């Protein structure tokens, strides 16, 4: 079975260090380990990636077109600015779930708009890093049909 791609945008490499009052103290490596464990329990594997560069994220989405069963994406700041990421996601045929660690709707008004949501099959926000696990459960359910 093809893996579920879990894609992370800018500054998520600093998870656990940057603004822990908003994003918590868990690192991205911790999130990856938890996702890998749950994916295995659900009968799936993951391909977990992060980049601070918009074009690299577009390339990750392109890679998922050939190799991925679905995409879970936390585009971080690119959520609100990237038509390029939206266009790449629109070229992907599988399920897409958008994840945000914080509740973006309780934050600055510029964070209330998401280009990615125009393609996402579901959006999970404000559940902390547990949102990734919720997204994995949902995407596994979608893939099971």
Image: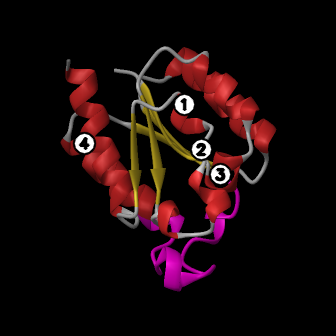
Cβ atoms at labels 3 and 2 below 8 Å apart: no
Question: Which residue occupies 58% across, 37% down?
Answer: 116
Q: Distance between the residues labelled 3 and 4?
A: 21 Å
Residue picked out by circle 1: 118
Q: In this view, does 11 lie to the left or right of 103?
A: right
Q: How crowded is mark 4: few (under 14 residues within 10 Å), some or many (20 or more)?
A: some
What crowding class fits label 2: few (fewer than 14 Cα within 10 Å), some (14-19), or many (20 or more)? Answer: many
Query: What secondary structure is found at the residue carrying circle 4?
Result: helix
Rounded to the nearest angstrom, the CA distance separating label 3 from label 1 is 17 Å
Q: Where is residue 7 in the image (x, y as percent from the top left)?
A: 56, 43
Residue indicated by mark 4: 137
The residue that mark 3 highlights is: 9
N-terminal label among 3 and 2: 3
Picture quarter with the C terminus = top left
The residue under label 2 is 114
Q: Residues within 10 Å of mark 3 (few under 14, many from 20)?
A: many
Image position of 141 (left or right of 46): left
Residue at point 62% right, 58% down? Answer: 111
Would residue 24 be found to the left or right of residue 37 on screen?
right
- Asked whether 4 or 74 is in front, the reply is 74
Q: What element carries label 1?
A: helix
- The residue range painted magenta reads 9-30
User: Between disc 2 and disc 4, whose residue precedes?
Assistant: 2
The answer to whether residue 127 is above or below residue 59 is below
Give coordinates of residue 134: x percent, y percent.
28, 50
Which of 133/114 is in front?
Answer: 114
Find the distance from the CA under tag 2 to the CA under tag 4.
Answer: 22 Å
User: Where 23 falls versus 130 (above or below)?
Assistant: below
Q: Where is residue 9 in the image (x, y as percent from the top left)?
A: 65, 51
| Res. 63 image quadrant | top right
Give the CA separation, mark 2 to mark 1. 7 Å
């Amino acid at each position: 079975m093809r893996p579920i791609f879990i894609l992370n945008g800018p500054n998520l490499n600093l998870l656990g260090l940057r603004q822990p009052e908003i994003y918590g103290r868990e690192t991205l490596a911790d999130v990856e380990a938890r996702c890998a464990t749950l994916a295995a329990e659900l009968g799936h594997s993951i391909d977990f990636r992060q980049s601070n560069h918009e074009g690299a994220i577009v390339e990750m989405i392109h890679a998922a077109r050939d190799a991925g069963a679905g995409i879970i994406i936390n585009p971080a700041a690119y959520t609100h600015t990237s038509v390029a990421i939206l266009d790449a996601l629109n070229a992907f045929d599988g399920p897409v779930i958008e994840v945000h660690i914080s509740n973006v709707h309780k934050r600055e008004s510029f964070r209330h708009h998401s280009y990615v949501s125009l393609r996402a099959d579901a959006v999970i926000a404000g559940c902390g890093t547990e949102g990734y696990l919720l997204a994995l459960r949902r995407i596994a359910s979608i893939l099971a049909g």
